[in-house]
Image (tube, grey):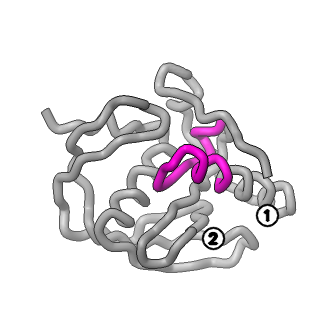
Amino acid sequence: MARLTIIKQDNPLIRKTSKIVDDFSPRLHELLDNMYETLLHANGMGLAAIQVGVLYRLAIILTEEYGLIEIINPIIKTVKNQRIDSEGCLSCPGISGRVRRPHLVTLEYQDRHGQKQIKTFHGMDAVCCCHEIDHMDGILFIDKLIK
């Protein structure tokens, strides 16, 4: 595995919209493995492919409930229990702030083999899912800060 470079908020690539993943080959598995190594090294909770310069709709998240989750082509099916919490981002070092997010999210997504999955996430796991999906749409948490 290799550590990848996490791009920062001033890189215009971070604002791009990611593309649907349709190739679930070993090349994708290598990317996911490298993202995991990068996330561990950065001591983060989640990492979207766009944050390492890859325009694919995928992210990895270290959840409390399920452990490591790889979400590919996620679709948010249910959101409930909006709350305001503090967030940060590996692409926005040194910045944190309060953002309103759901604390219950049901996602439909594909795993690394292209198999459809449906899971419900709670608390900070739900927050992290929404944060990473925002990245796939070119949105940073700093765009949603509550003043």
Magenta-tinted stretch = 36-52
Say which residue label 2 marks.
Answer: 110
Badge 1 or badge 2: first in the primary sequence = 1
Q: For the residue marked with disc 1, what is the amino acid? A: Phe
The answer to whether marks 1 and 2 mark residues whose Cβ atoms lie closer than 8 Å is: yes
Q: Is residue 109 left or right of residue 20?
A: left
Residue 54, which numbered label?
A: none
Q: Is residue 42 above or below residue 80?
A: above
How busy is the neighbourhood of tag 2: few (under 14 within 10 Å), some, or many (20 plus)?
many
Indicate the position of residue 66 as horizontal and vertical percent values: 49, 77
How busy is the neighbourhood of tag 1: few (under 14 within 10 Å), some, or many (20 plus)?
some
Q: Is residue 93 above or below residue 85?
A: above
59 or 134: nearer the eye?
59
Q: Give the residue displayed 86% in from the left and 62% down from the top.
A: 26
Q: Is residue 137 above or below residue 103?
A: above
Residue 24, which numbered label?
A: 1
Indicate the position of residue 21 as horizontal and vertical percent values: 70, 56
Magenta-span inclusion, residue 37: yes
Q: Main secondary structure of the magenta part?
A: helix
Indicate the position of residue 83 as horizontal and vertical percent values: 17, 59
Q: Is residue 105 above or below residue 94?
A: below
Magenta-span inclusion, residue 118: no
123 or 15: nearer the eye?
123
